[in-house]
Amino acid sequence: MRSLIILKRTLLFALGLCLITPVLAQKKNKVRIKAQFINVIDQGAFIEISGSSRIDRKNTAVSDIVFNVYDNTDSKRTKIGSTTTDENGEATFALSDFNTMEADSTGLYKIQVVFDGNDNFAKAKKNIEFKKAKLTAEVIQKDSLNFVTAQLLDGLSMEPITDEIVTVQVQRLFKPLRIGEEFNATDESGTIEAMIPNDIPGIDGMLNLEVVLSDNDDYGTVKAIVPSPVGVPAAIEDNFNKRAMWGTAKRAPLYILIFTNVLLLSIAILFIYLTRNLINISKS
């Protein structure tokens, strides 16, 4: 009787193990989604999306996963496209129809980013909400000094957006160069003003000036770019036809060519001399 009880418990344990093992094996990693709305005035709006997951106690970028993007404004869930993450777990989705998209009665846009899951990662989604802002910028001159002036307005009511920090900077290859005060807060008319230093170099004196409202809770990131010839023309020295160490063989420095040829000639003479001596030794 006791052996039957033990056998029954063993079978129940084995059955439970068989049922639990597939569940444990199917446990998937969670994907954390980050999404940010960016509007570059007169150039287009887009959403920067990134996906990461905690794998082996480390935050790891998730590459090659597809995010579907939906317009949830006024509770109308409409798919507007999809995008795939790169090797850094990042993707950019262009809102090509942003100017024709309709906001709700409060001027709010609602976007949902959805990952439908796969064999390794569970489903995930991220909701973002933002309003449209109007940012205008221009270069003006006062007392022989150049200034950037910009105005920030709400896109629906056209009321000034006050007391918001706006950054003024010059486009650079790696990192923008900030100009003006460290904190430029918009005044009661939504306006800021920043002086442009007169010693910033640019190709043919052209500078691409950026006015940026960065990562705002209501409006996301809004950027206006103003090209203006207010820089110092950069002197670009053309060394292509000059002899230099990094030039082609025809443009190598003369001393390198002379030294190399003398060295090769010396090696050749030494080789001939040794060969001749070997022949003489073999004959003797």
Image (cartoon, rainbow, N blue to C red):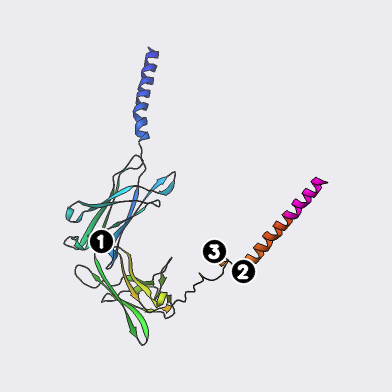
Type of amino acid at the residue the image marks with label 2: Leu
Type of amino acid at the residue the image marks with label 3: Thr
Mark nearer the N terminus (3 vs 2): 3
Q: Position of residue 213 (x, y in %)?
A: 32, 68
Q: Say which residue label 2 marks.
A: 254
Q: Which mark is residue 283?
A: none
Q: Nearer the viewer, mark 3 or mark 1?
A: 3
Task: Please state the extent of the stretch shown in magenta in the rendering.
Answer: 272-283
Cα separation, mark 3 vs mark 1, equals 54 Å
Q: Nearer the viewer, residue 6 or 205?
A: 205
The quadrant in which the N terminus is found is top left
Q: Magenta segment, principal secondary structure?
A: helix
How many numbered discs? 3
Q: Position of residue 144 (x, y in %)?
A: 37, 86
Q: Which mark is residue 130?
A: 1
Asked whether, in this view, residue 77 is left or right of residue 91, the answer is: left
Q: Say which residue label 3 marks.
A: 248
Q: Position of residue 182 (x, y in %)?
A: 40, 73
Q: Residue furthest right?
A: 284
